């Protein structure tokens, strides 16, 4: 195996820590392989690139036809969140180009991102359904929708952000 799997407390949301092989030229890492069965349940049909300036929020949206997204931040840092409206559980992962991980998000969850670095983020994301220009599989709601109120964040109910509308700009707590 060339990575380490971490399950998050929202079914199907997973983080794959890439195995980085450094040498005097830089480094090499495999981003996604079809034989990573415990991480990849389906296969990719389209690859997209997203560049976001510091502080930019791209949220909320979901896919209702079975799409799964795999996010890989190459530069900068990005907060990636997935929210289950039924259980009101939310998971958040901060992914960075300094320690590459792939974050798997089933499209049925509301999900979005925010660039949290002071430099732009560059993200490659792999998807399991082709984008249909005539009939997009994308349902949207505003990034600051007051209806996104998690009761649990990353498996914790004592997080001070629980029970209030999700604030992408809540200051990091230490």
Image: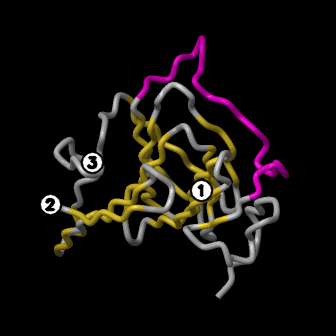
Q: Which residue is mark 2?
A: 1
Q: Answer whether residue 148 is magenta in the image.
A: yes
Q: Answer whether residue 133 is magenta in the image.
A: yes
Q: Position of residue 71 (x, y in %)?
A: 45, 50
CA–CA distance between discs 3 and 1? 20 Å
Q: Which residue is mark 3?
A: 32
Question: Quadrant location of residue 20?
Answer: bottom left
Q: Earlier in the sequence, mark 3 or mark 1?
A: 3
Query: Quarter of the image containing the C terminus?
Result: bottom right
Is 21 positioned to the left or the right of 72 in the image?
Answer: left
Q: Position of residue 81 (x, y in %)?
A: 59, 56
Residue at image position (58%, 24%) is 137
- Using the image, tell me which numbered label, if any, was put on residue 81: 1
Is 117 positioned to the left or the right of 101 in the image?
Answer: right
Question: Quadrant location of residue 46?
Answer: top left
Label 2 neighbourhood size at 10 Å, few (<14), some (14-19), many (20+)?
A: few
Q: Are marks 3 and 2 in contact (CB under 8 Å)?
A: no
Residue at image position (31%, 35%) is 42
Magenta range is: 129-149
Above/below status of 114 relative to 169: above
Label 3 neighbourhood size at 10 Å, few (<14), some (14-19), many (20+)?
A: some
Q: In the structure shown, which secondary structural element does the residue marked by tag 1 occupy?
A: strand
Q: In the structure shown, which secondary structural element does the residue marked by tag 2 occupy?
A: loop
24 and 11: which is toward the camera: 11
Is 93 positioned to the left or the right of 18 in the image?
Answer: right
């Amino acid at each position: 195996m060339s990575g380490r799997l971490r399950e998050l407390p929202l079914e199907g949301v997973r983080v794959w820590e890439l195995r980085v092989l450094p040498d005097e030229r830089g480094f090499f890492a495999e981003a996604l392989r079809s034989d990573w069965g415990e991480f990849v349940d389906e296969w990719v049909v389209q690859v997209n690139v997203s560049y976001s300036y510091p502080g930019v929020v791209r949220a909320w949206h979901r896919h209702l036809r079975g799409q799964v997204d795999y996010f890989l931040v190459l530069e900068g840092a990005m907060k990636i969140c997935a929210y289950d409206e039924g259980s009101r559980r939310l998971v958040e992962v901060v992914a960075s180009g300094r320690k590459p991980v792939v974050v798997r998000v089933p499209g049925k969850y509301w999900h979005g991102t925010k660039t949290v670095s002071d430099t732009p983020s560059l993200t490659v994301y792999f998807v399991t359904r082709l984008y249909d220009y005539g009939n997009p599989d994308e349902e949207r709601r505003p990034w600051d929708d007051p209806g996104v109120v998690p009761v649990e964040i990353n498996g914790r109910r004592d997080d001070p952000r629980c029970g209030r509308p999700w604030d992408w700009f809540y200051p990091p707590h230490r």
